[in-house]
Each structure stands twice: as C-alpha cells, then as structure tokens.
Amino acid sequence: MPSDLPFVDLFAGAGGLSLGLARAGLTPVGAAEMQGDALATYVAAHEAYFPGSALQVFEGDLAQHSLCSLRGQVAIVAGGPPCQPYSVGGLRRGIGDARDGLPLFVRVVREARPEAFLLENVPGLASGAQRARLDAVVAELAALGYGVDWRLLRAADFGVCQRRQRLLVVGTRRGSFAWPEPTHGPGRPVPYVRARELLDPARPLGETNPALVTYARSPDLRPSPWDGHLWNGGGRPIDPDGLVPTLLASMGGNKTPWLDGGGVVPAYHAHLLAGGEPRAGHVPGARRITPEEAALVQGFPVDMPWVGPRSSRYRQVGNAVPVGLAEAMGRALRAHLVGEPAADVA
Ligand SMILES: C[S@@+](CC[C@H](N)C(=O)[O-])C[C@H]1O[C@@H](n2cnc3c(N)ncnc32)[C@H](O)[C@@H]1O
C-alpha cells in the first residue's frame, strides 16, 4: 500500500464521507464523481486540506471506468451510491432504476479487492420491498470473500445536530467488525448538540436565502410546534433546543429549513391549539438557513471551498454523509484494520 489506509470514494459528491474518513486517519487517494460542481468542490477541498497529496480522479459516469488499477493500492472502497431509488420520499423503483449505483459499487469491490468496504445509503433500502435488494447486494459482496454486516445509525448519536439516519454496510476480510459506540444523547457522555449551538437567526453565515416564510392557509396541527404544516413550503422550522430536520438534497427556495428568529413557532402553535384563526403573510423574524449553515450542520469545515450556484451547493450539502458520522465509521474501520484508534484530529 502506498500510504496508511488509503481509500477510494465512489459517488464522492462534495466529500462529506471522505472528510470524515480522513479525520479518522484514513487517506483519500481516489474519487469518482459525475456531477461537475460536486467534483470541483471535492477536488478544491482535497487541495485545501491535503496539499501536495495525490488524488486519482475518475470523472464522469463510473460505469465508464475500470478501477482494476486500484488493486493493491487501496485498503478501503467507500461510497454512497445514488439513493433516489430507495428514499422513502422517492418513487421506490429500486431494481432496474438507471440511478441504481449498487451494481457499480459491487463491481468496484470485485475489481479493487480492498481489505474492507463501507457502503452508505438511505434507511429505506433496509425496509419494505427494498429489503430484498439490500439482502441480494449483501449476498453478492459476501460471495466476494467479505464478512458483511449492516446497521442503521443515527447521526445525532455521533455529535451531528440532525435527525438524519443512515444505512451503513461494512465488509471486512477477517474478524468481526465492531460498530462505533454512540457518544452523544441521553445517558451518554455528551448530550445531543442543539441547533442553537450552531445556528444564530441574527447572524447568517453566507448570503441569505430570499425565499420568505409564510403562514399556511390551512394549517395541519401536530402535537409538537416543530412538526406539522403551519407554514407554506417543504422547509420546516428548526427547534433551537432540538435537532435540525434531515437536510435534503432538494433544499433550496421554500424547501429550505428555517430559523424562528421572532420566536413565533411555539406561540402560534399554542394560538391555533386554543382555536385561534390562521394568520396570513410573512412570519416575522423567520429566515431560511444558507448553504453554508446547512454545511455546518452536516459537519463540513467553515472554510470549505464550495463550487457552484446556491441550488447546487444546497444539493451537494444535502447529499452528503455527515462528517461526524463518517468519522465514527472511519475510526471503527481503522481500529478493525490496524488495531488502533486514530489520534484526535482537531
Ligand atoms: C448521495 S451523493 C454522495 C455524497 C457523498 N458520499 C458525500 O458524503 O458528500 C451521490 C453522488 O453520486 C454521484 N453519481 C451518481 N451516479 C453516478 C455515476 N454513475 N458515476 C459517478 N457518480 C455518480 C452523484 O452525482 C452524487 O454526487
């Protein structure tokens, strides 16, 4: 191996997964990505955070590349194949969907023969009709000589201020993989990170999003003021004392979560519960989070060199694996492969 635990990131996006693995002491040496802005962000971040270190870039459709040259060069194949076919919000077409990256992931594992692999996806792949697809992929990977295990992990349990859950599939050639222990939350060493620790309604990070927050004509009340649809658009209000709703790749415009700078949400919810009339117009003091703030929630560094217009940056951020979750997985992989945890990286 040319370096200490080198890895390739397939479907690399802007690199949330890669940054987390690198923080755990693994070395990014290759990245495959077909979307121009995401690849440009990934490469710019690599140059900024790993200056002078080589990166083999597989640009365009991964289906057009052979990664046989990576055999003996990478310890880990990592990647989050496109997840639209499986997300609960999507059409759940699964098998046969052109956006199904799972066969490509299996093919690269066969070509590169790494010590271990890490596949990330949406929880929907492990439930309902899609579960058979997950089981089939696990069987294919096991047939390549790997012990394969999977779990659904909550990003918040690893210090990420978000409700996001992810499916992680790990394969190793020997021994059984020890999953990372949650570090944050009730009964754990550290409480969940609260939104107010990261986001300040009065201090936007980056250029503000002009999409106003407006009251819904026919509000749909739920027990929590932070759920339900009291407002127009898909973007939900962020409870400053709770976790940020799962950030979606479709963020942008009124699908973007927002901050309740005017303290309107609990009071308006109470007003409606008491039988008050729905209001109309703009919600005073409300503003939507910027791509930079969404990136902070996902655990990206503040100086991350994002490339592309606002809509593209929201998509890159929403698509990413939270850096803290990836780091926890990286530490567990490192411990499995070399028997030692990584030193703390600031
Ligand atoms: C869910 S995102 C990955 C996010 C990434 N793991 C991160 O943490 O930032 C999936 C990425 O796969 C890319 N992609 C989809 N199909 C691809 C293909 N056939 N070849 C290369 N890249 C592909 C998409 O452009 C998208 O950026």
Image: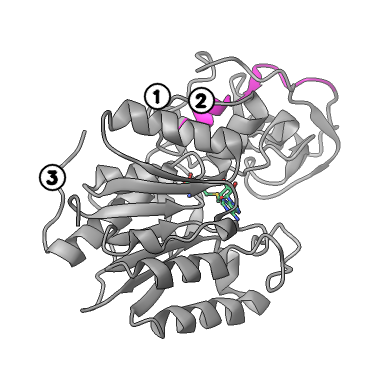
- Answer left or right for 163 relative to 175: right
Q: Residue furthest right?
A: 217
Q: Residue at x 33, y 82 (%)?
A: 145
Give whichever of 41, 210 is nearer the camera: 41
The residue range painted magenta reads 281-295
Rendered image: mark on residue 343 = 3
Mark 2, secondary structure of its residue = helix
According to the picture, the residue beneath numbered tag 1 turns out to be 302
Q: What amino acid type is highlighted by mark number 3? A: Ala
Residue 81, horizontal then vertical, whole percent: 54, 58
Q: Residue at x 19, y 65 (%)?
A: 337
Q: What amino acid type is highlighted by mark number 1? A: Val
- Answer left or right for 308 relative to 323: right
Asked whether disc 1 touches disc 2, contact meaning CB atoms under 8 Å apart, the reply is yes
Can residue 317 be found in the magenta stretch?
A: no
Which quadrant of the figure contains the N terminus?
A: bottom left
Give whichever of 89, 213 is nearer the camera: 89
Q: Is residue 237 above or below residue 160?
A: above
Q: Residue at x 45, y 65 (%)?
A: 108
Q: What amino acid type is highlighted by mark number 2? A: Glu
- Answer left or right for 84 relative to 246: right
